[in-house]
Image (cartoon, rainbow, N blue to C red):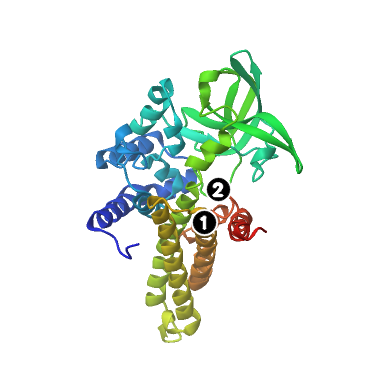
């Protein structure tokens, strides 16, 4: 691995960072205040992203994407992490699981998503099945050449803007020594399809404006052509396309941590107490030293995991380590930066209290910290037969 970026990669970083600073930062306070992104703002962000050639940059060139490597896409996500997720959502990174589309699905879902004509959302989580994906109760039953779906999904990010949803639904059940396990199939479901409802979700303290939604299926009839991949092959599709999404959480945590750190560093260099800059006090200076060390460690851990994917090397443990460490690092950095600012850190005059609230969800979605520790320990023990 090269411990440095190429000229092209440096250009990617500077271009996306400038975009976030100029097109995202100015709207953040409004989104935080109102909890919504105005449609004209969303369309402007999307249009400017397309002008830059970064829309769907996580897709290969043969389908109209920018064809970035895993490492390069991680750099993009790292810079986007500096801004409000409600706004950077419109920078446009469709779920790369759409590469599993075949035949007519490519024209109906994949290509329009890459062109920015249709937006997607991914749905797995249910009220009684979060980390336990195989415990989902939303069920699709065969009826001739169709499927009848009943059940509920919740915490579905981006579904408020989605034209269609990639939904993982139980389609069977196997008996195992550890109890019944559901067979899972991925379906493509259009907004407005009969029997399918997208409803408002819960009010969250994290990432205001980036809403979670509830999906309800009531005797929803889906054609067999809605199946993405193979019937009962949902886990195969997940394993091929989705596990790298944890890198996105890690990279965005690094980007946000650097923005927070920059605020703490500047304040420590400006604020005076007892006749000197507070950064000269060990109680503050040592915080800065610890924070930048952790940020750099998380950054390299994350980029290394993306690099392994580009080299076709096993990366499951490394990705889990990156997601675990970066998300927990962000929590520590936001907390310590608030400590440096004192009482003002908790006032909404500064964005620090927002970053503090936003940081909590990073340790939950795309696999909790506990799930990541399970993945890491399993990968270590399995080769030893344990």
Q: Which mark is residue 323?
A: 1
Q: Residue at x 36, y 33 (%)?
A: 114
Circle 2 residues within 10 Å: few <14, some 14–19, many ≥20: many
Q: Residue 87's spot in the image, x, y percent?
A: 41, 44
When asked about the image quadrant of residue 258, the answer is bottom left
Quadrant that contains the N terminus: bottom left
Mark 1 and mark 2 residues within 8 Å of each other at the beta carbon: yes
Compared to residue 65, the image places residue 286 above or below, namely below
Q: Residue at x 26, y 42 (%)?
A: 52
Q: Secondary structure at mark 1?
A: helix
Residue 213 shows in this picture? no
Q: Which residue is mark 2?
A: 366
Q: Residue at x 41, y 60 (%)?
A: 304
Residue 374 shows in this picture? yes
Specify which label sits upstream in the sequence, 1 or 2. 1
When asked about the image quadrant of residue 212, the answer is top right
Compared to residue 205, the image places residue 116 above or below, namely above
Q: Residue 42's spot in the image, x, y percent?
A: 38, 37
């Amino acid at each position: 691995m090269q411990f440095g970026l190429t000229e092209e990669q440096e250009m990617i970083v500077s271009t996306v960072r400038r975009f976030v600073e100029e097109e995202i930062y100015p709207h953040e306070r409004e989104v935080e205040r109102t909890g919504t992104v105005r449609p004209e703002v969303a369309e402007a962000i999307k249009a400017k992203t397309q002008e830059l050639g970064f829309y769907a940059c996580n897709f290969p060139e043969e389908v109209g994407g920018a064809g970035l490597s895993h490492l390069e896409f991680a750099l993009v996500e790292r810079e986007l992490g500096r801004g409000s997720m409600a706004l950077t959502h419109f920078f446009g990174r469709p779920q790369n699981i759409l590469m599993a589309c075949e035949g007519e699905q490519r024209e109906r879902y994949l290509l329009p998503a890459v062109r920015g004509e249709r937006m997607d959302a991914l749905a797995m989580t249910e009220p009684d099945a979060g980390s336990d994906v195989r415990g989902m109760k939303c069920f699709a039953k065969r009826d001739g050449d169709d499927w009848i779906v009943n059940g509920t999904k919740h915490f579905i990010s981006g579904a408020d803007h989605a034209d269609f949803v990639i939904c993982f639904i139980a389609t069977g059940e196997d008996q195992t020594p550890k109890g019944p396990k559901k067979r899972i199939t991925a379906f493509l479901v259009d907004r407005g399809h009969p029997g399918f409802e997208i409803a408002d979700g819960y009010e969250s303290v994290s990432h205001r404006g980036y809403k979670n939604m509830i999906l309800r299926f009531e005797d929803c009839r889906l054609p067999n052509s809605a199946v993405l991949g193979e019937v009962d092959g949902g886990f195969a599709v997940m394993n091929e396309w989705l596990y790298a999404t944890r890198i996105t959480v890690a990279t965005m945590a690094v980007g946000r941590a650097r923005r927070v750190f920059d605020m703490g560093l500047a304040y420590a260099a400006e604020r005076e107490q007892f006749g000197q800059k507070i950064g000269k006090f060990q109680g503050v200076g040592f915080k800065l030293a610890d924070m930048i060390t952790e940020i750099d460690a998380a950054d390299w851990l994350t980029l290394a995991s993306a690099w392994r994917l580009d080299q076709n090397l096993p990366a499951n443990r490394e990705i889990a380590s990156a997601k675990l460490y970066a998300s927990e690092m962000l929590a520590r950095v936001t907390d310590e930066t608030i400590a440096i600012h004192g009482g003002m850190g908790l006032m909404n005059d500064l964005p620090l209290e927002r970053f503090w609230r936003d940081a909590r969800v990073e340790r939950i979605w795309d696999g909790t910290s506990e799930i990541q520790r399970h993945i890491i320990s399993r990968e270590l023990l399995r080769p030893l037969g344990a």
